[in-house]
């Protein structure tokens, strides 16, 4: 049963406003008190009981390997300004006529991760996202939607929900990730190395349209892609350096100690941080608490952890020490050290251990932590929807080469035309296209490599190439749209020519006008 | 005592490798013992239900042969012993096995003669415990299921004059064997020779002897109470039970068996049978491989090109497994995270080495037990055992289990099955956790300490010790000897592709030990200056074969040819009842591509261009079997033994654990606290 729990955390503090929707709830069977009291209990109490009842919750955690999932869905992102609006926050942007958030949620569901916390920036957005999730994932996922104030950043968002994090490790996934890399792989790599943080790294997606014609022009005006500079050890398992391309002006500053310890570092610029992280909860929370000025996971927390991995300032010994104390009744201290020594000697020492043994005499105080990287194989698709360019790229890919992601079954012509849509005579819909339900198309239209949303009315003699047309769009006769994104409820009148434009929701493009590389939005009232 | 021993009628004999059809392969080899005692044993081998023996006569030369003509049998052109060598060999007197502490009187290694260097002393070295005439016979009867009684009897005779505890022990041993024989009428039809040997002992049990037995058992029982080590108590109890029953109905073997079934002994047997590993998968058997694949969690692709002789071993395409298992991390619901983590580490090779793997596994099981709650309508012993079995099969898929791990698992399951039903869930959980802790502490950690004590007494000033690979016990021995202030040098011999010796070398050098590092290619060169060879073992089998990292056999053979004593350090929990004559029938195959790779240079692979051609098959064996002849001494936590006696040793451990543990506690208390 789905209970979208809406926590509206104002100022990131505990003043909470709660609502419990969907009264047909059968709470998780492991929490009998909630089971019985059920609907009348407010969410507020639920969350306040949460930390005091860790044992009741334990079986659930065990089921998913002691991992807790936080989806950072974002809100109304500035980078996507003409596309996103109050009505359509970023998580709900359609990719192949499905909200982008659904790709993440479904990937998580495939991995049996059914208890999620979705963090949304802004209350309105949270309400919308919560509404959509409750509609779409009834009986499938147990999602808690948390709202955080806007502009707190990813680190701030986690700070705000910190007290709901209870599992040993936290999997933080960005809501705009469109990928078929199993999250389990990241989690497994994290566990295997007993790392503090594991980041999923994938190769930078091909950007820009594949279709010829506009390629030449695109290349000239192409902004430098926001790639990452990533340093890896020779086994490609550990993260030694990470910086986003924008930060790196000309020089890389790499701590000498790391370089000396590892001996060899591969620096790669063709990789991208996919914003799927596995964090050790204790470490994450401690870093967030100590460094209040950290704003973003990607820009602050991760580079910080990577930078300090050989001279760790975070208290790592808290948890393992506690574990050992449990054994103490039976085992004497010396035996324990022998056991740990046997175990340590058995494994091939990583550079962390070697460094530790050289620079730090006593093995009991751990001064290093491991930052791992999981590198997704090239056969997997992995992209983030964080720019307009990425939006059209992902739309193209999901119905194109990465069509396994879309979840639709393609026709023999390699396209999807909803049976309820109507096509006029001599209208062609090429391969890698999608036509949503209830859309009408006039005569002699041509659609290539484009996505057309639901209930669009398209006149005759319209040409749509490499574009995304969202729902309820009206296109006049004889218009031509190329490489553009047309948002919902846009009205485009006759003989309009659009090239590489973004049309904001509800905009009206007057007849006969020609636009190239523009972003058109309706004036706010 | 092992009940499985007699239960199999005729084993399947699988022939691999070099044999002519219709030819009996065995008789061609030169026998030191009576030939009739060695050929039936093979056919009735206890191991035959767990593995198919390979009928290749091992290229072992018996020490008898050596005594007759030492030079021609040596596998290497050995130089004449130089004066230095002779001196070095004389030092071996220090190595006499029965010298260290009272524990060894129990093992009663007779001190060998002082003129080391000719065949005579060689013989006593390897002959070990028994006089030569017996030892051959015993050794050959070790693998057998037939209780050829005379050697055991002679063992008793040999032991009797030794110490107070010995008659106790041996008589119990006798008795249990007797029980075994009488409870098992079945093999009589199958083997014409068996009855004679099995009936033989009965009249021997005179009244006086029986009384002695009873007294001994009483003593043992008292000791049991003192220590209250449950499993040993069970053994003793079963023996005692049997004894009383035998008084009631000594004639009717069937009734004995029936009454036994009521008693704890039979149920124990059943458990044993249950715990016994299923007949090992032969991976050249297509249909069964298919079946197993359907069950398996890890999606593995069988390697296509496999070396003909090793087709029966599992070999998978490395590289894909890990990624696949990782991607399933969150999808396998019932798997405990600790188990999954350890499995991943096995698969990735993050944990290697018998002790470490065993400890990691046991600790994972401990976590499982801690987080375990019995599902409704199930009982803890059954459900937990089933759970652990499923975890074990998962581990096996990640990497084949070592024999020591098998022993540990058997112990754990046994403990779970023996839980008293009156215990509450939390009580039984904590009891299992304590048991696991105890196993780790006693069988591994404390055992290692005792081994270190024993073995480092063999290290003398001026010694040059050769070690191979990286064994944690051997490392501890070296470090402890170094801490004691002994002046010695270490030669670390290493081999590709794993180069495990490097890590050992690093640690030794860090502690200030003088080291030489070389690869196994040069072992015959460096062996000149070596005075002792210390080796670790993955397992010691009941015929004295040492199953260890590949290359160990080579080192031991070279050492033997150079008359350098080879000392194996091995914890007693690694002893296994299996008999294995070669390293073909049971082994592990590593990543074949690792051979072609150059460590440190991942980009260099000289076999890249040819590895795709059909003519090339790569073989990366993980283990080999060192015949007992090449091993001078095995140091275990119960003392030092000769490899020939390892079967008896196995029995000893099984039956006298109690007495020894008692002793061992005293001993360790004395030496450590």
Image (spheres, rainbow, N blue to C red):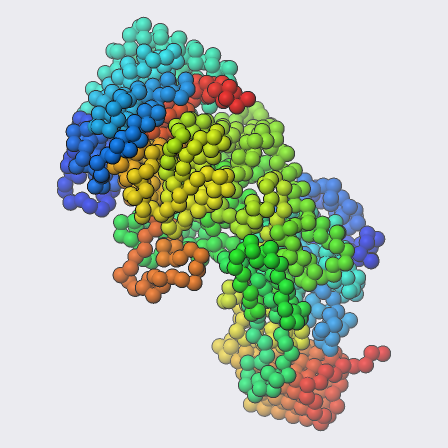
As drawn, is A44 to the left or to the right of A179?
right
- Rendered position, B284 above or below B673: below
Q: Which residue lies furthest to the front in this view?
A: B83
How many tags in the picture?
0
Image quarter in which the N terminus of chain B is found: top left
Residue positioned 59% across, 83% down in the render: A219
Q: Which residue is drawn at 21% across and 28% down?
A: B119
> In the depicted view, which residue is nearer to us: B603 or B665?
B603
Q: Position of residue B316 (x, y in %)?
A: 38, 53
Which image quadrant for residue A385?
bottom right
Residue B284, given in percent of the width and then of the height, sits at 30, 50
Q: Looking at this rendering, what residue extends furthest in the top direction?
A: B208
Instruction: Report if residue A425 is visible in the image.
Output: no
Residue A44, given in percent of the width and then of the height, sits at 79, 49
Quarter of the image where one finds residue B142: top left
Answer whether residue A264 is visible to the viewer in this image. yes
| Residue at screen point 85% across, 78% down | A525
* Residue toward you, B145 or B229: B229
Q: Is residue B338 above or below residue B317?
A: above
Q: Quadrant of the C terminus of chain B?
A: top right
Give the camera-side residue of B578 and A423: B578
B119 or A188, which is in the foreground? B119
Q: In the drawing, does residue B27 fall left or right of residue A451?
A: left
Task: Tell me where residue B490 appears, x and y as whole percent.
Answer: 40, 38
Residue beneath the point at 29% across and 37% down: B559
């Amino acid at each position: 049963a789905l209970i979208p729990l809406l926590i509206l955390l104002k100022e990131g503090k505990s003043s909470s406003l709660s609502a419990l929707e969907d009264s047909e709830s059968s709470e998780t069977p492991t929490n009998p008190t909630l089971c019985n009291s059920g609907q009348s209990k407010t969410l507020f109490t639920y969350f306040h009981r949460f930390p005091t009842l860790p044992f009741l919750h334990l079986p659930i955690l065990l089921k998913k390997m002691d991992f807790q999932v936080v989806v950072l869905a974002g809100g109304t992102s500035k980078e996507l300004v003409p596309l996103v609006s109050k009505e359509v926050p970023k998580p709900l942007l359609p990719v192949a006529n499905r909200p982008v958030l659904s790709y993440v949620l479904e990937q998580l569901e495939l991995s049996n991760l059914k208890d999620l916390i979705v963090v949304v920036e802004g209350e309105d957005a949270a309400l919308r996202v919560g509404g959509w999730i409750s509609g779409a994932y009834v009986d499938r996922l147990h999602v808690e939607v948390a709202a955080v104030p806007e502009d707190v950043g990813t680190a701030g968002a986690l700070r705000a929900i910190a007290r709901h994090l209870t599992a040993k490790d936290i999997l933080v996934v960005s809501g705009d990730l469109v990928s078929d890399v199993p999250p389990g792989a990241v989690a497994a790599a994290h566990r295997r190395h007993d790392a503090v943080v594991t980041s999923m790294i994938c190769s930078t997606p091909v950007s820009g349209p594949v279709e010829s014609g506009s390629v030449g022009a695109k290349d000239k005006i192409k902004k430098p892609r926001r790639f990452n500079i990533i340093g890896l050890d020779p086994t490609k398992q550990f993260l030694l350096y990470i910086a986003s391309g924008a930060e790196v002006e000309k020089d890389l500053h790499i701590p000498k100690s790391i370089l000396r310890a590892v001996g060899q570092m591969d620096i790669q610029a063709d990789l991208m941080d996919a914003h799927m992280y596995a964090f050790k909860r204790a470490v994450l929370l401690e870093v967030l608490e100590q460094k209040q000025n950290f704003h973003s996971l990607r820009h602050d927390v991760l580079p910080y952890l990577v930078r300090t991995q050989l001279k760790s300032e975070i208290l790592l010994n808290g948890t393992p020490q506690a574990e050992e104390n449990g054994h103490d009744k039976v085992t004497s201290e010396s035996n324990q050290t022998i056991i740990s020594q046997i175990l340590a000697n058995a494994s091939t020492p990583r550079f962390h251990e070697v460094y530790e043994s050289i620079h730090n005499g006593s093995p009991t105080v751990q001064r290093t932590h491991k930052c791992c990287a999981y590198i997704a194989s090239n056969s997997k698709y992995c992209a983030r929807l964080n720019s307009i360019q990425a939006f059209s790229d992902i739309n193209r890919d999901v119905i194109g080469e990465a069509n396994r992601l879309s979840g639709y079954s393609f026709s023999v012509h390699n396209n999807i035309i909803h049976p309820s849509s109507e096509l006029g005579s001599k209208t062609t819909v090429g391969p890698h296209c999608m036509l949503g339900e209830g859309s009408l198309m006039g005569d002699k239209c041509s659609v290539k490599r484009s996505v057309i949303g639901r209930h669009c009315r398209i006149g005759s003699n319209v040409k749509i190439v490499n574009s995304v047309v969202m729902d309820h769009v009206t296109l006049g006769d004889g218009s031509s749209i190329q490489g553009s994104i047309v948002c919902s409820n846009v009205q485009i009148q006759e003989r309009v020519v659009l090239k590489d434009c973004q049309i904001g929701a509800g905009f009206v493009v007057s007849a006969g006008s020609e636009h190239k590389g523009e972003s058109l939005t309706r004036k706010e009232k | 005592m092992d009940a499985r021993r007699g239960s199999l009628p005729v084993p399947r004999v699988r022939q691999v490798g070099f044999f002519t059809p219709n030819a009996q392969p065995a008789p061609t080899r030169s026998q030191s013992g009576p030939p009739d005692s060695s050929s039936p044993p093979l056919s009735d081998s206890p191991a035959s239900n767990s593995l198919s023996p390979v009928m290749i006569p091992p290229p072992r030369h018996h020490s008898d042969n050596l005594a007759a003509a030492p030079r021609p049998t040596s596998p290497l052109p050995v130089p004449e012993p130089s004066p230095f060598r002779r001196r070095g060999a004389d030092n071996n007197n220090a190595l006499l096995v029965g010298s260290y502490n009272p524990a060894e009187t129990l093992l009663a290694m007779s001190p060998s003669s002082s003129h080391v260097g000719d065949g005579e002393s060689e013989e006593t070295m390897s002959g070990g415990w028994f006089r030569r005439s017996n030892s051959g016979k015993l050794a050959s009867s070790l693998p057998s299921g037939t209780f050829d009684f005379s050697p055991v009897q002679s063992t008793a005779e040999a032991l009797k004059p030794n110490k107070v505890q010995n008659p106790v022990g041996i008589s119990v041993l006798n008795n249990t064997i007797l029980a075994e024989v009488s409870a098992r009428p079945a093999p009589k039809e199958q083997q014409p020779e068996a009855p004679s040997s099995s009936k033989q002992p009965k009249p021997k049990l005179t009244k006086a002897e029986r009384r002695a037995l009873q007294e001994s058992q009483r003593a043992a029982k008292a000791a049991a109470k003192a220590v209250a080590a449950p499993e040993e108590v069970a053994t003793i109890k079963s023996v005692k039970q049997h004894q009383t029953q035998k008084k009631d109905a000594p004639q009717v073997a069937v009734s004995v068996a029936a009454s036994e079934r009521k008693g704890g002994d039979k149920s124990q047997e059943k458990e044993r049978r249950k715990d016994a590993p299923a007949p090992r998968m032969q991976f050249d058997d297509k249909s069964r491989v298919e079946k197993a694949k359907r069950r398996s969690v890890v999606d593995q692709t069988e390697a296509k090109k496999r070396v003909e002789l090793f087709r029966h071993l599992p070999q998978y395409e490395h590289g894909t497994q890990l990624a696949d298992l990782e991607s399933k991390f969150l999808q396998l619901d019932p798997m405990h995270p600790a188990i999954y983590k350890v499995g991943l580490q096995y698969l990735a090779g993050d944990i290697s080495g018998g002790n470490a793997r065993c400890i990691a596994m046991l600790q994972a099981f401990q976590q499982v037990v801690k987080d375990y709650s019995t599902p409704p309508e199930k009982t803890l012993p059954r459900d937990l055992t089933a759970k652990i079995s499923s975890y074990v099969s998962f581990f096996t898929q990640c990497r084949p289990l070592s024999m020591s791990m098998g022993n540990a698992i058997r112990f754990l399951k046994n403990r779970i099955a023996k839980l008293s039903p009156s215990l509450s869930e939390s009580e039984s959980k904590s009891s299992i956790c304590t048991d696991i802790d105890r196993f780790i502490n006693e069988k591994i950690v404390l055992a290692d300490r005792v081994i270190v004590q024993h073995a480092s007494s063999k290290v003398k000033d001026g010694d040059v010790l050769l070690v191979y690979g990286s064994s944690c016990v051997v490392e501890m021995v070296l470090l402890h000897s170094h801490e004691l202030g002994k002046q010695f040098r270490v030669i670390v011999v290493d081999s590709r592709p794993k180069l495990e010796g490097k890590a050992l070398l690093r640690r030794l050098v860090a502690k200030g030990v003088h080291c030489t590092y070389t690869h196994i290619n040069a072992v015959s060169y460096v062996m000149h200056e070596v005075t002792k060879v210390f080796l670790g073992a993955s397992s010691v089998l009941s015929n004295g074969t040492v199953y260890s990292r590949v290359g160990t056999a080579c080192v031991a053979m070279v050492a033997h040819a150079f008359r350098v004593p080879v000392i194996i350090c091995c914890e007693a929990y690694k002893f296994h009842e299996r008999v294995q004559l070669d390293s073909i029938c049971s082994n592990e195959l590593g990543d074949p591509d690792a051979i072609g790779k150059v460590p440190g240079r991942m980009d260099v692979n000289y076999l890249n261009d040819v590895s795709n051609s059909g003519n090339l098959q790569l073989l990366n064996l993980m283990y080999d079997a060192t015949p007992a002849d090449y091993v001078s001494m095995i140091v275990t936590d119960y003392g030092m033994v000769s490899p020939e006696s390892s079967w008896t040793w196995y029995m000893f451990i099984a039956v006298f654990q109690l007495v020894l543990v008692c002793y061992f506690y005293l001993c360790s208390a004395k030496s450590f606290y």
